[in-house]
Image (cartoon, helix red, strand yellow):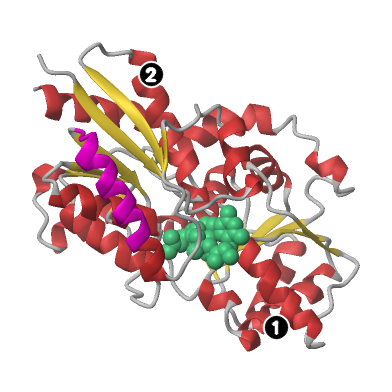
Amino acid sequence: MKRKKIDLIVGARPNFMKIAPILKEFEKRNYSDSSTRLVHTGQHYDANMSDIFFKDLSLPKPQVYLGVGSGTQATQTANVMIKYEKLLSKEPVDLVIVVGDVNSTLACALVAVKFQIPIAHIEAGLRSDDWSMPEEINRILTDRISTYLFTTSKEGSDNLLKEGISRKRIHFVGNVMIDSLIEYLPIAMKSSIIEKLHVKKNSFALLTLHRPSNVDDKSVLSGIMSAVNEVSSMLPVVFPAHPRTVSAIGELQRSGDFSASDNLHIIDPVGYIDSLCLQHSAKFVLTDSGGMQEETTVLGVPCLTIRANTERPVTVTKGTNIMVGSDPQKIISESVKLIKGYAKKGSIPEKWDGKSARKIVDIIRREMHG
Ligand code: UD1
């Protein structure tokens, strides 16, 4: 039997903790009839946006590094496509596994489908119905051209069925990111980040912010940051800041539109282990991240999402997530409720149990080898 080759694609920070459990599952089973290749597009390249995740998640060095770096939407997507097409034309594979919704996900999927290579999309079917987000476009197009669609919730599967995707291609397997969380939480609880930052468990809020809609518009960002300053007068706020946010805040500071209060600790982006530790230890989380809405739900930590919509509604209906948008008054009033102890109690969504990668590999094996 011909040995089947499988590419696993990572590009940006939220990809690493999703690919890790799948790659490890393949490695654990050590099949003689298939082999994997880890491809890093280089969309994220800073040590604290990429390298540290390889260390924290014990990921092997990628076999291929495309080194695309930053750029506009089209430049970045096109650069990944050009480099990945060259790779596949020299060294083709039998399946391409992509995760999530970043530009690298769509770019590699587009290249694969034109080589008529089947694509497995992990975290398929999420929909915010907000076409102003590049991620929504990436999700919809990647799903449309994927052969195997692995969903994290029944709502995700329903979204795909509504779009006319055949039921046979849809597999509700749960959430691979939660596989990583369950594996690494015991290690994260031993992290010393809390002591290093001189904050106490349950006595600080954690903030992350990087969506273009929140950080690229000066008035939106200054509204959010003034609300955060106000929250920090009641509870210290720890803010690991994304590179694009650091530069946007720098501009606000230079123009005199923002000055961080003493209780707002703006720090460099943190790795996976410290991020889990901070989320687990925070009184509540303020974020516009997709993944953290899900992680806080599993950790049972209240989450206020600084967005108007979410592609992860199960975190609101079942979990601890509340959508607050970017209105400063709403951010402050919902934070005050949490500081006073009025927190929503959530439950863990179906199949977010640490066994998703196992199910995905079983299904891929069945489909590829019969
Ligand atoms: C990307 C994803 C987003 C994801 C986020 C996680 C897309 C469309 N967006 O957004 O879904 O939530 O990653 O972080 O794919 N930069 C650095 N160093 C790096 C990476 C980026 O300095 O290692 C800076 C660059 O100036 C770059 C900017 O951050 O222009 C934005 O990076 P980019 O990869 O384009 O998008 P993200 O905002 O990170």
- Residue found 11% across the figure and 47% down from its top: 167
Is residue 111 placed above or below 218 in the rendered structure? above
- Neighbor class of circle 2 (other Cα within 10 Å; few <14, some 14-19, many 20+) is few
In the image, what residue type sits under mark 2?
Glu
Q: Residue shown at 63%/39% (left/top)?
A: 52
256 or 140, nearer to the observer: 256
Tell me: 280 left or right of 211: right
In the rendered view, tell whether residue 316 sits above or below residue 212. above
- Looking at the image, residue 294 lies above or below residue 273: below
Horizontal and vertical percent for residue 119? 21, 43
Q: Where is residue 41 in the image (x, y as percent from the top left)?
A: 42, 47
**Callout 1: CB less than 8 Å from ligand 1:** no
The quadrant of the rendering that contains the N terminus is top left
For the residue pair 293 and 262, the one nearer the viewer reads as: 262
Q: Horizontally, is 54 left or right of 337 in the view?
A: left
- Pick the residue in front: 53 or 85: 85
Residue corresponding to mark 1: 222
Amino acid type of the residue tagged 1 in the rendering: Ser
Q: What element carries label 1?
A: helix
Of marks 2 and 1, the one in the foreground: 2
Report the magenta stretch's main SS.
helix
Closer to the chain start, of discs 2 and 1, is 2
The circle drawn on residue 27 is 2
Left or right, residue 24 beside residue 254 = left
Q: Is mark 2 on a helix, strand or loop?
A: helix
- Magenta range is 78-93
Q: Which residue appears at 49% of the width and 39% of the height?
A: 17
